[in-house]
Image (spheres, rainbow, N blue to C red):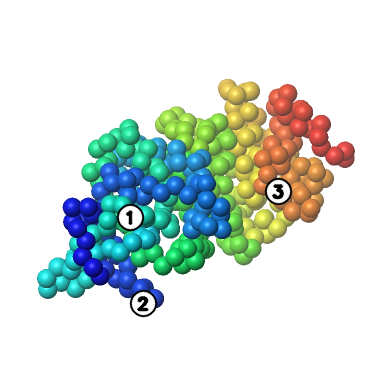
């Protein structure tokens, strides 16, 4: 590879490697130069002449917020890029594939993976210039033309599998609702020992009854919280108290806990063994506690009057869609409405309007 004038190049410590007979270089780049070297805008180029999707601007603010709120504890994965000109790699003496990568300052560098991270870095640096001293790894490939770059984009993204909501909840230590869900799953009935911690659906023969993600969603609804809201100690205690008291009036859950009935049987026969039922019970709890703040624990006893069988006509028109349980917001709210009618909690105007959309019995 020919030498380049160092006065007009970016120089990075790098490692050279090989994939499919082609060299690549992993370099350590200061964040402050990322917006400069990855500045090519393809937004006006037709898709068939691009090697990357257009920027989804709705994704950027959350990524920027993540950087700004966690300057001492963030993780950004490597960018992958193709360089359309010759680059130089100067190997260190007596080393094996370790050296300095030199990239011309006027090089056209195409991001194959990481354009949203690049944009987030650019915007975060405007508010926190000190982030520019941090580094991010970049994997450089020598550009072999549009066809190869498009194939690289397809290959890099086709095998990317987003983790399940339950697994994300299990591992996310920044999200307050995930933290609370993990606590409930480990320390509060009915969830102790009956929670699927990794998957967001319970398999047919599983010994688990709930998923961690459904506990998180139901508890958010119980406490009236948004995705990024925090929780006070009192609110966390209220959530635990609600689920524990509800458990006292759910004989099927008690039998599952004592292993006198299988969770698989409950899921086959009953709505309360599914996420839609748990979410509706969370919504019910919020309304009940607001309506009867001093006596809600006693009022909750009426939940024993609910016919939870899937064959119950109320669930067929509220909770089921084409013979299957629905996880839609409408189904959850309609299921909650039926519970509120049984517990004698008045419906809101919006809920009354939703009731009018139901098919007749």
Looking at the image, residue 71 lies above or below residue 52: above
- In the image, what residue occupies the spot 54% across and 37% down? 220
Q: Nearer the viewer, residue 354 or 232?
A: 354
- In the image, what residue occupies the spot 50% across and 37% down? 227
Q: Alpha-carbon distance for marks 3 and 2?
A: 50 Å
Q: Is 190 left or right of 137, judged from the image as shown? A: right
Q: Nearer the viewer, residue 220 or 293?
A: 220
**Residue found farthest to the left:** 93
Q: Nearer the viewer, residue 248 or 53?
A: 53
Label whose residue precedes the other's in the sequence (1 or 2) = 2
Q: Where is residue 36 in the image (x, y as percent from the top left)?
A: 32, 45
- In the image, what residue occupies the spot 38% across and 47% down? 39
Q: Is 197 left or right of 12, judged from the image as shown? A: right
Q: Is 345 left or right of 10, judged from the image as shown? A: right
Q: Position of residue 251 (x, y in %)?
A: 65, 47
Packing grade of label 2 (10 A; few <14, some 14-19, many >=20) is few
Identify the mark at residue 326; answer none if there is no mark.
3
Tag nearer the camera, 3 or 2: 2
Query: Which type of secondary structure does the marked residue at label 2 adopt?
Result: loop
| Residue, disc 2 | 21
Query: Which type of secondary structure does the marked residue at label 3 adopt?
Result: loop
Packing grade of label 1 (10 A; few <14, some 14-19, many >=20) is some
Label whose residue precedes the other's in the sequence (1 or 3) = 1
Q: Alpha-carbon distance for marks 1 and 2?
A: 23 Å
Find residue 12 and report its image quarter. bottom left
Identify the mark at residue 107; answer none if there is no mark.
1
Looking at the image, residue 91 lies above or below residue 321: below
């Amino acid at each position: 590879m020919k030498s380049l004038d160092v006065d007009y190049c970016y120089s990075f410590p790098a490692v050279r490697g090989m994939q499919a007979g082609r060299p690549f270089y992993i370099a350590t780049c200061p964040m402050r130069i990322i917006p400069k070297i990855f500045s090519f805008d393809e937004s006006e180029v037709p898709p068939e002449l691009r090697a990357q999707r257009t920027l989804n601007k709705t994704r950027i603010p959350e990524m920027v917020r993540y950087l700004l709120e966690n300057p001492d504890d963030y993780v950004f994965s490597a960018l992958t890029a193709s360089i359309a000109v010759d680059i130089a790699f100067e190997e260190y003496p007596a080393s094996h594939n370790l050296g300095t990568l030199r990239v011309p300052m006027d090089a056209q560098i195409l991001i194959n993976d990481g354009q949203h991270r690049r944009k987030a870095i650019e915007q975060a640096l405007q508010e926190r210039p000190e982030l520019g001293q941090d580094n991010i790894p970049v994997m450089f490939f020598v550009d072999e033309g549009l066809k190869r770059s498009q194939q690289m984009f397809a290959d890099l993204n086709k095998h990317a599998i987003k983790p399940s909501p339950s697994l994300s909840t299990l591992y996310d230590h920044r999200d307050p609702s995930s933290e609370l869900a993990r606590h409930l799953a480990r320390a509060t009935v009915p969830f102790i020992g009956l929670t699927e911690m990794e998957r967001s659906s319970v398999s047919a023969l599983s010994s688990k009854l709930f998923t961690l993600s459904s506990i998180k969603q139901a508890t958010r609804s119980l406490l009236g919280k948004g995705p990024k809201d925090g929780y006070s100690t009192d609110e966390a205690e209220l959530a635990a108290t609600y689920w524990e008291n509800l458990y006292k009036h759910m004989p099927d859950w008690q039998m599952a806990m004592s292993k006198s009935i299988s969770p698989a049987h409950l899921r086959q026969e009953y709505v309360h063994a599914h996420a839609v039922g748990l979410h509706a019970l969370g919504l019910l709890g919020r309304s009940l506690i607001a309506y009867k703040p001093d006596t809600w624990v006693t009022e909750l006893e009426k939940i024993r009057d609910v016919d939870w069988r899937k064959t119950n006509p109320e669930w067929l028109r509220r909770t089921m869609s084409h013979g299957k349980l629905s996880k839609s917001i409408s189904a959850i709210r309609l299921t909650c409405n039926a519970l509120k009618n049984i517990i004698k909690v008045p419906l809101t105007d919006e809920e009354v309007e939703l009731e009018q959309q139901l098919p007749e019995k």
